[in-house]
Image: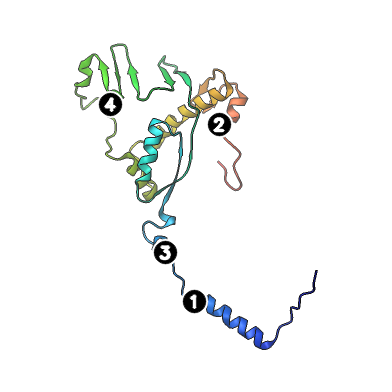
């Protein structure tokens, strides 16, 4: 390797120093998007898991929301058939290939997509003031974003969201293990199944912990 002469003169030092100071104090042009309500620090980063019917609808909905940014997407298995049985005998059947929800009782059924029921009188029956009423939201995606920004409670209580997401996670773990599992909702763990319980969480990077 050839030797490098690192000696400098007083004049050269002053010249380079003046150039450096000029660059340091020169005006910097910053895009307007860095400031204001749409600044990167004010945008909510969203990851979408599952791009099926409802998943794709949610993705499109958030793409049209100011202040939200889709940063990651991933798809899930495309074929499944899972049955959940509750202690009170209620069965939840979850399978691929169809969209919508159907509720069946001892006196009939009602479903969405397409909206239909048996008997047909269920379609026009009026929900009384003492009956169970679902929350009413004209834009639940915007409600979700607003609650993140303002630290407010969402229309649907967080416990409902947690229990709803748990159902999906339990189904995924059942598919990964390939066997029937028993869930303890009080302890939030599988009964006598160490392998399945290991799938409930992943190692967290320090210093994060639960």
Question: Would residue 202 be visible to someone looking at this image?
Answer: yes
In 3D space, how far apart are the residues under numbered discs 1 and 2 (Cα atoms)? 54 Å
Q: Which residue is mark 3?
A: 31
Mark 1 and mark 2 residues within 8 Å of each other at the beta carbon: no
- Give the SS element for disc 3: loop
In 3D space, how far apart are the residues under numbered discs 1 and 3 (Cα atoms)? 16 Å
Mark 4 and mark 3 residues within 8 Å of each other at the beta carbon: no
Point out the frontmost of discs 3 and 2. Answer: 3
Q: How many marks?
A: 4
Which numbered tag is attached to residue 200?
2
Point out the frontmost of discs 4 and 1. Answer: 1
Label 4 vs 1, first from the N-terminus: 1
Q: Quadrant of residue 17?
A: bottom right
Residue 130, position in %: x, y? Answer: 23, 26
Q: Which residue is mark 4?
A: 132
Mark 4 and mark 1 residues within 8 Å of each other at the beta carbon: no
Residue 75, position in %: x, y? Answer: 48, 34
Question: Would residue 187 be visible to someone looking at this image?
Answer: no
Residue 22, position in %: x, y? Answer: 53, 79
Q: Which residue is mark 1?
A: 26
- Give the SS element for disc 4: loop
- Give the SS element for disc 2: loop
Label 4 vs 2, first from the N-terminus: 4
Label 1 vs 3, first from the N-terminus: 1
In 3D space, how far apart are the residues under numbered discs 4 and 1 (Cα atoms)? 65 Å
Q: Residues within 10 Å of mark 4 (few under 14, many from 20)?
A: few
Is 100 located above or below residue 106 in the figure?
below
In 3D space, how far apart are the residues under numbered discs 4 and 3 (Cα atoms)? 51 Å
């Amino acid at each position: 390797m050839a030797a490098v002469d690192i000696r400098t003169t007083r004049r050269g030092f002053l010249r380079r120093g003046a150039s450096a100071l000029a660059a340091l104090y020169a005006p910097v042009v910053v895009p307007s998007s860095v400031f204001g309500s749409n600044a990167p620090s004010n945008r909510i980063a969203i990851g979408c898991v599952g791009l099926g019917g409802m998943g794709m609808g949610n993705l499109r909905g958030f793409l049209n929301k100011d202040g939200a940014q889709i940063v990651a997407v991933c798809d899930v298995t495309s074929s499944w058939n899972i049955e959940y049985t509750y202690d009170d005998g209620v069965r939840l059947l979850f399978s691929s290939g169809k969209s919508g929800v159907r509720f069946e009782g001892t006196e009939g059924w009602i479903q969405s997509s397409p909206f239909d029921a048996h008997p047909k009188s269920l379609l026009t029956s009026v929900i009384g003031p003492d009956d169970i009423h679902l929350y009413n939201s004209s834009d639940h995606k915007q409600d979700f974003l607003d609650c993140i920004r303002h630290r407010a409670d969402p229309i649907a209580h967080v416990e409902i969201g947690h229990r709803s997401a748990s159902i999906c996670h339990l189904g995924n773990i059942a598919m990964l293990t390939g066997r029937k599992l028993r869930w303890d909702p009080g302890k939030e763990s599988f009964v006598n199944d160490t392998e399945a319980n290991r799938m409930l969480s992943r190692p967290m990077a320090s210093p994060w912990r639960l």
